[in-house]
Image (spheres, helix red, strand yellow):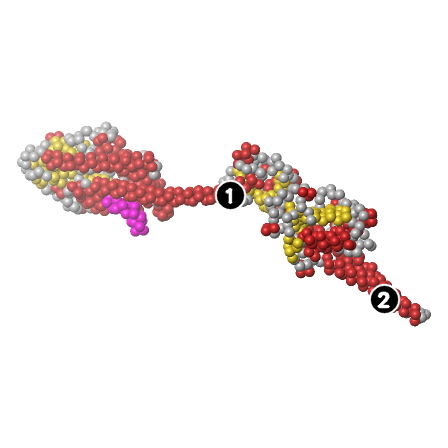
Amino acid sequence: MATIRALLSLFIFSLILPLSNAQAAEPPLMTLNSPGDFKLGEYSVWYEDSSAVMTPAQALALSSEAWQQSTSEALNFGFTHSAYWLRLKVINDSVLNWSIWIRYSLLDYVDIYLCPAGETDITQCHQKHGGDEYPFAEGRDIDHPNLIFKTPMTPGREYNVLMRVQTSGTQQIPAAFVDDQTLEHELLNNNIIRGGYYATMLVMGLYNLFIFFSTRERSYLYYSAVTLTFLMFHMSYEGSAFQFFWPGYANLNHYALPLMFSINMVFISLFVPNFLRLKKYSRPAHRLFRVYTAMSLMSLVMLPLTPYQLLVPLNNLLSTLLLISALLVGIRFWIQGQSSARFFTIAWAALITGLILANARSLGLIPTNTLTLYAYQFGSFMEIILLSLALGERIVRLQKEQLEARQAMMKSQEDAIQYLRDYEDLYQNSLTGKFQLDEDGYFMKSNPAWRKMLGYSDQARFTNENPPFNSLLADSTEQHKLWRTLRDQGNVQGFVVQMHAPGSTERLWVSLTIRRRATNERAAWIGSGQNVTDEHHTEVALIHLQKEKTQALRQLVMGIAHEMNTPLGNIRMAESFLNEEHEDWTEEEINSHLKEGLSHIHDGIERLNSLNQLMKNAIVEENQYPQEKLQLRPWLDNWKQEMHTLHPQIKLNAEVHSYLIEWQTSPDALSIVLTQLVDNSCRHNPQLVEKGELCIRIDFRERNNQFEMQYQDNGKGIDDEQREVIFMPFYTTQRTEARSKGLGLYQTYNLVTELLQGQIEWPRDPEGFALTVRFNLPKEKRTDDMDTDLPLDDLAAD
């Protein structure tokens, strides 16, 4: 906007003609015979006073050869230190009153002398003095920013008008004779347009300033600053600022125009990159306008140090570059499709068009009318309106983008909340215990699975008690190892510890996974725990089973080696003996020794065959023991009869305390198990057998959905250490007397556990040898509604 001066100067410099080349002439006579506006330019002759010291009398006395004829309606001599004199002849051929109106307010000194024709004494001339170096009211016949001087002329009389102009700015003199009626009409129009223009600019500036205070959008601030500083610049250029703000301080006019000019350029150089978002879309253009901002600020600093005649042209050049750059950037962005750049470009084009029309009118290239007279005001007005529309459109677009961004953010927040809810559902409903600890090791949060693992039925009780994490660890060594690992590595995974629930003696084996908190988490430690007690017990049992198998294999190998050693030794000895040559033996002795050797070999082979058969019997093969539905009571009676035949000395009592009639099992395997147990009792208690005091009791009953067989004798029994090895192969305490070579109970164990799918248990503190075998019953055979706690005497027995 401040580029008005720049364009004015460009057109002025480009269209100034070397008026010094005009031919010497007398001014033609101007006849004022009708109402109107008569330009003085083409009726004037001019003289340049380079020393600026010529007096009016000397100017009046100049010969016609010294004067040069003007060929333009509006005289313009550019920037110069000279004073210029104008002279013209005028005759008032009407009864109208006339005034000289100079439509340029920045002239420092203007002196007018109205002399009757033929008058050579300057003191007899009507004199007027004015300009912006005088107080505003001095010399002005009408209170108006422009210089308007009344010229009292007698109708029908000819006058010589002598005018002296001197200024530090542009020497342009757009002067005209205007009658009172025309002057009043034009002043009325001028005041209406000027007042509307000022009001519009002021309202737009303040309105957008208030918007800035409410939105804090800097584009509104820059726009308001551009509008208000341009208004002040325009008022300084037009003279209204001198009229209204400092009418008594004419010396301020030296600084007002360049000051407002520079400030306006500063805000334009800030507004354009902010409005077009050059920092985002064009970094080179953004840097260029930063340079313009620095240069504009520099012009402010130079204001008190630089002469007016040098500073104003420099500002004009800078303003021209700024204006052209803004227009080109706007066109480029318009082509790229930015809707706000369309309004921006049209706004600058409207301003430039108004400036071109105003300058063309002032130079006489186009006729003067309302449009051309107020062209740059219309252009700047359109610029302000269009920029406001562009700013509004840009803000609407930014608001739309912000709304879309907020909607996207809200959608993201909703998704994040949903994710948190899903995570919370997973957290709370997880089968794995989860917890969070603070720096001191107290629980901040836990899920139901963790609380249930520790024996808490509700969260309130757990929160009230809030046991320290360390208090749950049963082994202090494991506790120190856990925290040392966490301190060194920041996390543990699958760390198995033994824990106990508060107020309970039950021990749990828990697999812990703990990590140090992330930066955005409140808890110091985030962890989870899985109850692996069953898995731990299973693993311990497997280890124990593996140990038993290893021990059994070792025992088997050692037993086989031991049992085979004697027969093999006898066979080897007989072989060696028979291989020896004894020439002194008679035939009878030879036959006797052969028979003896063969006898040893035969005994060894028999013992090896017996051992082989025992080992084969010890190996359980399911097809060797067919399954059938066993009538338990009759079968048990038959078995007892067989045992009485084999061991008539023992007292054997075998009873069934159950409603179970049929049992799907292997009768042969069951018979071997019972017979082996009885043989074992008889072999280890020979004294009781001889005295007839060995009592054996076998009871079958149902208990907890299982079929239970209890075996007990009144013998000497076995200690706890023997219980661990009694079922291993070749284990016996009477190796020389044992017929089964320690494989009898080994076979019994295999038949019970592998074929009959039973479990062997040892009663606590029994009298004699006792064990319990539990068999799983099929579901259809279970009698859950039985009273299994009735005493044996009250149960039916066969």
Residue at position x 18%, y 37% from top? 193
| Magenta stretch, residue numbers | 327-352
Foreground pick, 780 / 149: 780
- Give the labeled residue for mark 1: 429
Q: Quadrant of residue 142?
A: top left
Closer to the eye: label 2 or 1: 2
Secondary structure, mark 2, is helix
Residue at position x 75%, y 51% from top? 678
Identity of the amino acid at label 1?
A: Asn
Residue at position x 39%, y 45% from top? 408
Residue 333 within the segment the image draws in magenta: yes
Q: Main secondary structure of the magenta part?
A: helix
Which is more N-terminal, label 1 or label 2?
Answer: 1
**What is the CA distance from the residue labelled 2 to the residue labelled 1?**
81 Å
Q: Quadrant of residue 248?
A: top left
Answer few, some or many: residues within 10 Å of disc 1's Cα (few below 14, many 20 plus, some between 14 and 19): few
Answer few, some or many: residues within 10 Å of disc 2's Cα (few below 14, many 20 plus, some between 14 and 19): some
Residue 66 within the segment the image draws in magenta: no
Residue 163, position as x, y percentages in the image = 16, 36
Report the side of 385 relative to 122 (left or right): right
Q: What is the quadrant of the N terminus in the image?
A: top left
Foreground pick, 531 / 311: 531
Residue 97, position as x, y percentages in the image = 9, 33
Q: Residue furthest top?
A: 248
Mark seen at residue 759 = none
Report the side of 287 relative to 496 (left or right): left
Residue 503, position as x, y percentages in the image = 61, 35
Residue at position x 19%, y 40% from top? 374
- Give the labeled residue for mark 2: 598
